[in-house]
Every structure is written in C-alpha cells, then in structure tokens.
Image: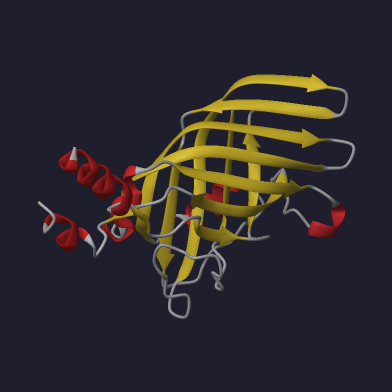
C-alpha cells in the first residue's frame, strides 16, 4: 500500500507545467492569397516585439524574420449567404531568417513567396489541416490550421515542444483601410502557437525516493 501511495505521489509531483501558450506573433504582418481557386497560401513577417512567451528569441535587429504558408490544397468550398468557407489539406509552413531584409510583396504572391522564403530556414514543417471562413459583406474572416515542425536550423531549440502540434490562427481583413497589395486576398494578423504543457521533473523526486 505504501509503495502504491508513493507511486501516486510521483505521478502527481513529477509532472509540473513548464509553460503554456508558446507563441510567435505576426500581428498585421502578412497577406493571404488564393491561386487558381485550387490552393491557398500566405506570407508575412513575425513581430519584432514578441510579448507572449516565444519558445526562443529571434535576432530582429540583424535579421528579417519571415513566415510562409504554401500549397494548402482546397478540398471543399461552400457559400452560405455572404459567408465563404474553404477546407484545405496538406501544405507546408516555414519560418526564415534573412539578413538582407528584402521581403517584397510585389504585385503577385509569387514575388512575396520568393523574397519571403529566400533566407535561412529556421523552422519548417507540414500543415495537416486548415480552414478559412470569409464574410464578403464585412470583408473580414478567420483562418485556422494545425501543423508540425520537423526541420530547420533552430528546430532543436523548440525542445520537447517539437513533438507537439502547433496551431495557426489568424484574423483576416480585405477592407480598404488595410491596403491589401494587388494579387493578394486578405491581410493576415495572428499567431503560431502551441498550448501544450511540457512535463518537467520536480525537485522533490530524490526526497520521495528516500521513502522507499
């Protein structure tokens, strides 16, 4: 009975929340696009000021930090009044460090992608599900997706967080005031985050072992 009780204590005390909501922000720093009604993507900048607990810091003084979502294939499309709803499958995500600071949205997404992905790939991964809802009356919407990071020069810095899925959540707008560049559909403003809790070993482990 004593051993069962100690095992229960170990199971409770040895798992301690390290952090929650690990976040990379890109508020008002990106634009989405639709290609030939078959795929959706987006490209933009991460925020220089990351106030919401990023898993590691980027050097924003010496590098332009860009992100891109590509090749998300549209699997279903529906309209309900002013609501337009896309479902997507597949696609890739990347976060890049570029010392040239040369992101240029240009007049078409091809230019934005070319200049937004020409830096060193810090994090790369795949998107396994995504959805986009847009209200053509208010010209606003939301994009949400889920992804895994499995590559990039800074993947190891994610530590245990690399094994969890990450969410991409954006508010979007095509209103005149946000000045969406030619060739793009909406401005993206959101974050890439995970709210998984990483278990860490408690300092009480040795004390509990001494009870045996």
Q: Is residue 80 above or below residue 131?
A: above
Kindly identify the residue that appears in the image at 50 percent across and 40 percent down. 70
Residue 91: horizontal and vertical position, in percent? 46, 34
> Is 176 on the left or on the right of 152, as rendered?
right
| Residue 206 appears in view | yes
Residue 172: horizontal and vertical position, in percent? 72, 47
Q: So how many labels did they put on this image?
A: 0
Colouring method of the image: secondary structure
Kindly identify the residue that appears in the image at 54 percent across and 69 percent down. 50
Which residue is nearer to you in this view: 61 or 117? 61
Q: Is residue 17 above or below residue 65?
A: above
Q: Quadrant of residue 16?
A: bottom left
Which residue is nearer to you in this view: 201 or 19? 201
Kindly identify the residue that appears in the image at 51 percent across and 58 percent down. 23
- Residue occupying the far front of the picture: 1
> Is 174 on the left or on the right of 142, as rendered?
right
> Is 211 on the left or on the right of 150, as rendered?
left
């Amino acid at each position: 009975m004593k051993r069962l009780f100690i095992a229960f204590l170990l199971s409770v005390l040895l798992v301690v929340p390290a952090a929650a909501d690990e976040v990379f922000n890109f508020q008002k720093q990106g634009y989405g696009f639709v290609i030939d009604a078959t795929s959706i993507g987006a490209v933009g900048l991460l925020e220089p000021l990351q106030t919401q607990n990023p898993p590691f810091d980027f050097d924003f003084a010496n590098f332009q930090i860009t992100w891109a979502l590509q090749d998300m294939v549209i699997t279903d499309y529906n309209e309900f009044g002013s609501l337009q709803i896309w479902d997507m499958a597949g696609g890739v995500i990347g976060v890049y460090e570029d010392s040239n600071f040369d992101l240029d949205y240009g007049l078409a997404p091809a230019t934005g992608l070319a200049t937004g992905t020409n830096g060193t790939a810090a994090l790369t991964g795949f998107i396994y599900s995504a959805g986009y809802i847009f209200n053509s009356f208010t010209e606003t919407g939301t994009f949400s997706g889920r992804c895994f990071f499995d590559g990039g020069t800074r993947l190891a810095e994610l530590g245990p967080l690399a094994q969890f899925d990450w969410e991409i959540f954006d508010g979007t707008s095509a209103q005149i005031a946000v000045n969406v560049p030619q060739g793009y559909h909406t401005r993206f403003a959101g974050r890439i985050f995970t709210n998984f809790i990483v278990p860490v070993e408690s300092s009480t482990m040795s004390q509990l072992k001494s009870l045996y």
